[in-house]
Amino acid sequence: MHNNTLLYHAIEGFENVLFAEAEAKYAYRGVLTEIGDYYRRFLATVPISEGNSYLIDIFRIKGAKKTEYILKGSPEPYSLLTPYDMVEVNYHIGPEMVIWPPAPATDQQKIHVFAETLINESLMATFDYGDVKVRIHMAACEDTKLMTGKALKSIKKGGLKEYLILAREGEASEEHAYLAVHESFRENSQIKSITELKVNGKGTAKAMKIELEQGIKDYIIQTIDEGPQYPRYTVSGNFPITFSGRSVHIRTKKDKISWMQAVQAAELLAGGIQLIEKGCPTEFRGIIVRVNRMAKGAKENSFIIDGKIPEGNNFANQTIIVTWKNGWKWGFKIKFAKKNTIILEDDPGFDVLGEKIYNRYYPIGEYKGPATFLISGYAEWRK
């Protein structure tokens, strides 16, 4: 099993993540069997004020008739609070088999559900730690079953922990998209509402509006379009948005744009401000023809590519996503790039010889090439 890094962008160090996305279709290879099936999660950190932010969480699954979105709190004691009239129930949910050692799962290894209700509106639930509260808001929850239950904190140490479970059912050909926002606060929540927005255009775009205090509104658009040719989308509202690419965040205050940022975007026009012109994408793609590794005596860890780095770009501190022919994707931090060389922070752990890739770490072996790459690129505008 291999988890693919699809998108990763950080600023001021690799740890300060703005946007990240991963997929793990092969974790459910017995269920998600069709070529078009997917199991993807997109996360974006959005600042509100100095030292205060919230987390966008978009979880998208296609290929399953039933899906569940499950949350639990941290190891510290907490209470799970929901503002809904719940019906008392008594049943267990969870896997039928334990992976290792292989054996039928017992009720003790599952979640004991003790209350449920059907949600047909936006959702809110709170993990209350006393001094600090962690709240989840979710949009577009039509025909979503909300469940609360308990399961073991630890099989070895015992103890119970409360769980929040959201479940949906439908056709395997339909996408299940969970559009959530997470925030932590001490006194008052700064998020007033979260709404899914209608997107015009044929493709995979999802859009949300998050209303904050002091007249602030955030607009998030996210797609799973592969590119490099991206569909064009428009979003209606107080000001029109035209976008193509992978991810964008726009902040307004009293309906005037304060700032915009986009990752792997091919076009962005909002409120009369053109951040990215059509035909001038932020991304850069190509093929890796050679790998230099310090572990083999090279002076640097780097990729030699089949083209030249665009003028005016060195892609410092950005992420290069490498894709092998088998579909595996790997993310590496870039020190900087020049001419036909992309210098990396760390050992990539593989070599390229002609049309073959040799992985030097787990899973060690020979794989088919070529090794292609994508640098998503980033653009921003601030008032």
Image (cartoon, rainbow, N blue to C red):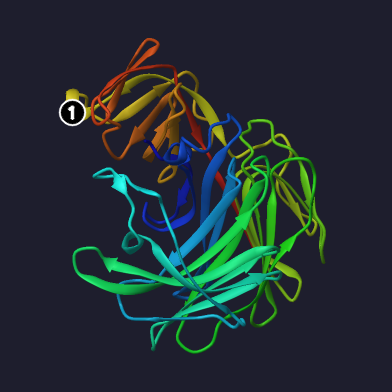
Q: Residue at position x 55%, y 40% from top?
A: 38
Q: Is residue 219 left or right of residue 321?
A: right
Q: Is residue 291 above or below residue 101?
A: above
Task: State the image quarter where residue 350 is shown.
Answer: top left
Residue 247 picture location, percent across and down: 61, 49
Q: Classify 5 as above or below 270.
A: above
**Residue 319 falls in image quadrant:** top left
Amino acid type, mark 1? Ala
Image quarter hosting the C terminus: bottom right
Please state which of residues 114 and 370 is positioned toward the viewer in this rendering: 114
What is the crowding at mark 1: few (fewer than 14 residues within 10 Å), some, or many (at least 20)?
A: few
Q: Is residue 79 left or right of residue 100?
A: right
Q: In this orientation, does residue 383 appear?
A: no
User: In this rendering, is residue 26 above or below 87?
Assistant: above
* Residue 235 spot, x, y in % from top left: 79, 55
Q: Is residue 106 left or right of residue 373?
A: left
Answer whether residue 95 is visible to the viewer in this image: yes
Q: How many marks?
A: 1
**Regarding mark 1 in the picture, which secondary structure is present there?**
helix
Which quarter of the image is occupied by the N terminus? top left
- Identify the residue shown where x is 59% and y is 75%: 124
Where on the picture, by quarter, is residue 51? bottom left
Residue 53, horizontal then vertical, whole percent: 50, 71
Residue wearing tag 1: 295
Counting from the top left corner in percent of width and height, residue 59 is at 55, 53
Residue located 72% across and 42% down the image: 277
